[in-house]
Structure formats: structure tokens, C-alpha cells
Amino acid sequence: MNTTNHLVDAIGQHHQRDPNARIVSLVPSITELLCELELAPQLAGRTGFCIHPADVVAPIPKVGGTKDVNVEKIRKLAPTHLVVNIDENEKPTVDKLAEFVPHEVVTHPVAPRDNLALARLMGAVFGRDELAEEWCSRFEAEHAALRALPSLPTRTVLYCIWQDPWMTVSRDTYIANMLAELGWQVPQLGTARYPRFEWSSALVEQLDCVLLSTEPYRFTEAHADALEKQLGIPVFLVDGEMLSWYGSRALAGLGYLRALRAMVEGQSQATF
């Protein structure tokens, strides 16, 4: 298989195939993908937020968070490759790590089908092409099933990721593009990718429903119940990992979208 095209990362860097790479992953969702590609034995380090699959990642050393990285700990782990993400990791930190980590593989999925290129990049760089292609085939089948659903009227949904202050997602984010698979759109509230907002009657009048994510803020059913009473429109608690984690979780996320559509269209309230 010619993997040349799959060896270019999100910022155009060309990589060489290295089946014996020693990897530190600073991206929780991609850590899960690397484990699915049977690369866990080569993971020298992970963030504290890299929690899936729990039994597999448990013995892998933690190197801090996605942004508050322990640079000296990574130096001692002596990785050959660092896997990072444009949204989740800080460039100054990555630049500092680049002083002693030979290879930085940069990722930036912004839409569901970007997962295909992501899986193939990981497979090509780390010598797991066949496993990556098998995963891509499963993704294509699940995506086709989602696309085969009967079309419904467009909905406007507000996806909340934080409160105090309230924060949401803009239309150019992975989450918004996942929701767009259902024909749902998020309101554009300012120019930030993750804008702050305040509740107002003008905002609520635009919305068909509100989605409260279980991460990064830990919204609960109690939050959803209270907000629904306050706003007078449907509010649903949704699994943030299913809608924001690319890589392995995205495959299950496509099935989750189908179930979410059924729940919202049925106007029933439940915890996923």
C-alpha cells in the first residue's frame, strides 16, 4: 500500500514511517485511537485526561494536562514522537518540546470525515496501516447509515460547554460539524471559536432546543431540568465525549447522533 499521502500532518509536515516509535500523546481522543491501533506498548506518556481505554492506559505515565504539560517529565521519557492537536495544546509548549522531541505529529480534525485522514495518518506514521484501513471501513459504514436517515427540517440548537460564564461552540468547530450531520445548526454568537454568551429572550427565540454537554463542564440532569424550566424550551443532557472526541470515539459518536436525533425529535428527555 502506498502511504505517502497519509504521511503529511495538519500543518503540512512530512513524516517518515516508524513502526518502532516511542510516542507521547497530548490528545486524549487520539490516545484512545492509538490504543485501538495496537500502539499502547509504544506509548511512553499521556495526559491525565487520556482516560480511555481505562485498563490499557492505566500503566502509561502521565505528563500533566493538555495545556499544563510537565516538560521535564517528557524529556526524561525520551520520546521519538509527540502527537498534538492545534485546538487542545499550546503552541509555545509544543515549540519547547520540539527542542528535544525529534518528531511532532500535528492534528486538527474539524469535521467528522476528517477522522478518516486522522486514522490513516496515525496508521501510516506508526506502521498500523491495515488496522487503520479496517477502522476507516467501519467508519464509512456507520457514516453511510447516518446519511441514509430521512431528512428533517433544520433545527437551531445551542450546545453549551460551560457555565459561569456560559460558553458555546461556533460553526467552525468539530462539535458543530458533528451536529450538522443531523441538519442541526448552532447560532453564531460572536467571532470566537468558543464564545461566551448571556441568556436573552432574543437568543431563546432562535432556538429549537439546548444541549448541555457532560464535558468539559460536568452538566447533569439537574442542570438540564432547571434550565428547561427557566427557558421554557427543551433542554437535553448529552455525552460530550461522543460529540467532541475524534478518533476512535467518533465511530460510536455517529451511532450516538442517530439516537440523539430520535430523542430530540421525540421531545423526550433522557440521559445518554
Image: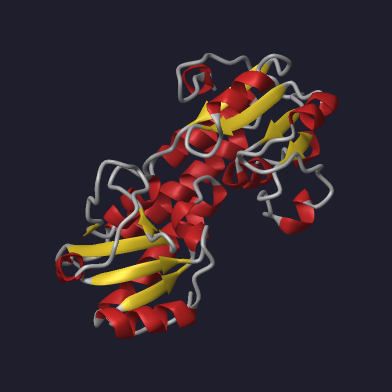
Residue 232 visible somewhere in the drawing = yes
* Number of numbered discs visible in the structure rendering: 0
Relative image position of residue 246 (x, y in whole percent)? 49, 46
Residue pictured at 38% horizontal, 42% vertical = 113
Q: In the figure, residue 76 lies in which quadrant?
A: top right
Residue pictured at 36% horizontal, 66% vertical = 258
Relative image position of residue 133 (x, y in whole percent)? 53, 37
Relative image position of residue 47 (x, y in whole percent)? 69, 43
Q: Nearer the viewer, residue 147 or 270?
A: 270
Q: In the displayed structure, does residue 255 sit left or right of residue 55?
A: left
Q: In the displayed structure, does residue 55 sit left or right of residue 34?
A: right
Q: Is residue 191 above or below residue 202?
A: above
Q: In the figure, residue 126 lies in which quadrant?
A: top right
Q: Nearer the viewer, residue 247 or 28?
A: 28
Residue 2 visible somewhere in the drawing = no
Residue pictured at 22% horizontal, 58% vertical = 183
Q: Is residue 124 above or below residue 246?
A: above
Relative image position of residue 163 (x, y in whole percent)? 43, 64
The image's colouring method is: secondary structure
Residue pictured at 58% horizontal, 47% vertical = 29
Q: In the displayed structure, does residue 60 sit left or right of residue 38?
A: right
Quadrant (top left/top right/bottom left/bottom right) for the N terminus: top right
Q: In the displayed structure, does residue 76 sit left or right of residue 134?
A: right
